[in-house]
Image (cartoon, grey):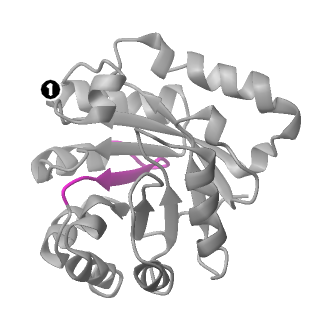
């Protein structure tokens, strides 16, 4: 069974983007609590398997965030299923997940599968546009967080700003409403200082895009584990 309760820092690797083998080694040995493999566009089975084969040389837990059923592979420790709460198209809340489980159900070990209540906050993000999201206000987001914990009983609520730095005050406002559900923040974290601000309220901070734009600064974000 997944025990992510101690995860403070997670790196997210996109199979459609490139790092050198040396950089991948540094990610895997950085001290991060886990690595998520996932993205929005051009996610292929070959890309997923290439990353998995490299990460598997190390002991760090590795998670596949399932966004394309054709790129699902065995060999990951866990599988995260995003449910996009602010999508206006039901497809991204339920239908694609239903299709994947219908197709792969006999092969799934459900002890390895967890759903994430996703709230995407950047209207310019590819994921926001793909899921045909609606931009929620503060009260909407808090209501989504409450639904995630008290209605759907999901283990994760993921506030995702997809490449832009989010609203610390919004994250602070969500914090008191989640007791059992793990609060995850992702988006726009390029420095250790960025990570520290969000880690003050989020249970887990995810660092992704900055690995591909300023690798040296991104690696330093792992130090929030020693500070917070």
Depth order, front residue of 212/218: 212
Q: Is residue 182 magenta?
A: yes
* Residue neighbourhood size for the residue with mark 1, other residues' Cα within 10 Å, grouped as few (<14), some (14–19), many (≥20): few
Q: Which residue is mark 1?
A: 137
Is 150 placed left or right of 200 in the picture? right
Whether residue 6 is visible to the viewer of this picture, yes or no, is: no
Give the mark count. Answer: 1
Residue 66 image-quadrant placement: top right
Query: Which residue shows up at 24% across the image and 83% down it?
Result: 216
Segment tinted magenta in the rendering: 177-188
If the image is split into quadrants, where does the C terminus sit? bottom left
Residue 165 position in % (x across, y down): 14, 53
**Label 1 secondary element:** loop
> Is residue 14 magenta-colored?
no
Residue at the location (81% across, 31% down)? 105
Q: Which residue sits furthest top?
A: 89
Task: Give the quarter of the image for residue 141.
Answer: top left
53 over 90 or under it: above or below: below
Q: Is residue 150 left or right of residue 55?
A: left
Against 184, is 217 above or below?
Answer: below
List x then y, in percent, for residue 50. Answer: 60, 63
**Residue 161's quadrant in the figure?**
top left
Q: Quadrant of the N terminus?
A: bottom right
Q: Residue at x 34, y 28 (%)?
A: 144
Q: Residue at x 50, y 80 (%)?
A: 28
Question: Image check: 41 left or right of 168?
Answer: right
* Left or right of 50 on screen, residue 173: left
Question: Looking at the image, which is closer to me, 116 or 5?
Answer: 116
Q: Position of residue 174 (x, y in %)?
A: 26, 43
Q: Is residue 188 above or below residue 110?
A: below
Asked whether residue 126 is in view, the answer is yes
x%, y% of residue 149?
47, 36
């Amino acid at each position: 069974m997944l025990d992510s309760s101690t995860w403070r820092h997670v790196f997210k690797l996109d199979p459609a983007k490139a790092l050198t083998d040396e950089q991948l080694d540094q990610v895997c040995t950085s001290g991060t609590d886990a690595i998520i493999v996932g993205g929005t566009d051009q996610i292929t089975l070959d890309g997923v398997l290439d990353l998995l084969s490299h990460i598997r040389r190390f002991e760090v837990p590795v998670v596949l965030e399932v966004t394309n059923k054709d790129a699902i592979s065995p060999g990951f420790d866990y599988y995260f299923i995003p449910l996009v709460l602010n999508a206006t198209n039901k497809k991204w809340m339920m239908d694609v997940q239903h299709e994947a489980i219908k197709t792969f159900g006999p092969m799934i070990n459900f002890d390895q599968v967890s759903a994430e209540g996703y709230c995407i906050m950047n209207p310019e993000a590819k994921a926001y546009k793909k899921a045909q999201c609606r931009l929620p206000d503060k009260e909407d987001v808090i209501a989504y967080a409450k639904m995630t914990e008290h209605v759907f009983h999901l283990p994760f609520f993921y506030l995702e700003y997809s490449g832009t730095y989010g609203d610390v005050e919004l994250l602070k406002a969500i914090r008191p409403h989640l007791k059992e559900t793990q609060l995850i923040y992702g988006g726009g974290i390029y420095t250790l200082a960025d990570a520290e601000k969000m880690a003050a309220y989020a249970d887990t901070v995810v660092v992704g895009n900055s690995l591909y734009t300023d690798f040296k600064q991104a690696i330093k974000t792992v130090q929030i584990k020693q500070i917070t």
